[in-house]
Amino acid sequence: MLKRMNRLGPKAAVLVVVCLLLHGGGSGVAAKELCVDYYDHTCPNAYKIVQGVLVEAHKSDPRIFASLIRLHFHDCFVLGCDGSLLLNTFPGFESEKDAVPNNNSARRYDVVDAAKASLERACPGVVSCADILALAAEISVQLSGGPGWGVLLGRLDGRTSSKAQAENLPGPFDSLKNLTDKFSAVNLDVTDLVALSGAHTFGRAKCLFVTNRLYNFSGTNQPDPTLNPAYRAFLSARCPRNGDANSLRDLDPTTPNTFDKNYFTNLEANRGYLDSDQLLKSDPGALRTTAPIVDRFAGSQDAFFKSFALSMIKMGNILPITDPSRGEIRKHCAFVN
């Protein structure tokens, strides 16, 4: 517990302390609270088990850490952090996996399944798939050089999924207003929007998400005027007009596999890969909303890391299921029991 507490910023530590007080305050409260120490007695090695699976997966897949934090993000924004993204489609049931933002894009469900299998061997029927996603996200960030935080645990897995809602996930072509509205709908503010967007400091995206900015911005047959000319030339060589739209390119060409503040320094220099990234700095509406936050994070990695950790804790608390009448501990993450 003390090791986990030491990784937190001051505000995050307060959140955990309050949680722990409630956790110890009576059986009626304990079932309804997410707490850092939730598995300390029932599965004390849960964190290390998930970490071991991720370290092994990373040996053959340097993209794995960025992919896993994305799974947690896409899960929490639809029906809350309930593992609903992990469910498979079957006759009469459409999964979030098949929504456009996830299909052939969200990846490495098999690593989540491997973590679940390892946990089932160590402590069967104890750790939820939703909590595995939350743990995997924190571990992925920390192993990539980013901050750690006390992951609040105790979520149950949902029994349903919503492909329709997943079609409306925050996306690379959204306007700043749309992004702000989508975050606000799940009680996340503009600081959360900017901080969580900072996860694009690692990982890759397909050329199809940048080709319009390179060759036909807003239907003008011209490049996006906010693109740094040198960066535009760099991207054009890697995403040619008639090239493979599915080719993957680094979101941050400077340190593509490291979690740092370079995402924000790139935005300062008009080197954002996605339009939804660059508009946080360059959109006219950003001047009094997101741009000052971009400036602050570009100037201080410590400020970014502290805000990111707090925003991840907030995101992880979107509509968690803690009532056993509404959720379960799945035996396999892709299927309800």
Image (cartoon, helix red, strand yellow):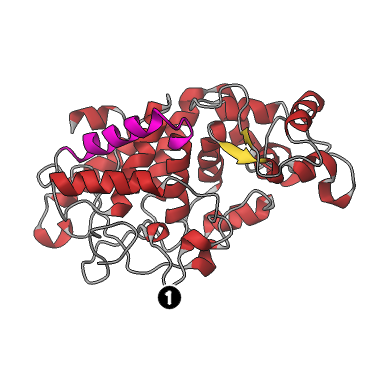
**Residue appearing at x 26%, y 48% in the figure:** 116
**Residue 151 location in percent, x, y?**
30, 41
User: Up-down: is 161 above or below 262?
Assistant: below
Q: List x then y, in percent, for residue 207.
A: 69, 41
Q: Residues within 10 Å of mark 1 (few under 14, many from 20)?
A: few
Residue range of the region highlighted in magenta in the rendering: 45-64
Q: Which residue is mark 1?
A: 91
Residue occupying image coordinates x 35% and y 40%: 136
Q: Position of residue 246 (x, y in %)?
A: 66, 44
Left/right of residue 5 with respect to residue 67 in the rendered view: left
Q: Is residue 237 above or below residue 18?
A: above
Residue 236 within the segment the image draws in magenta:
no
Residue 21 seen in this snapshot: no
Q: Is residue 267 above or below residue 332?
A: above
Q: Is residue 50 magenta?
A: yes
Q: Residue 59's x, y, as percent?
A: 39, 27
Tell me if 13 is positioned left or right of 246 in this view: left
Amino acid carrying mark 1 in the image: Pro
Task: Let me know if residue 63 appears in the view.
Answer: yes
Q: Quadrant of residue 90?
A: bottom left
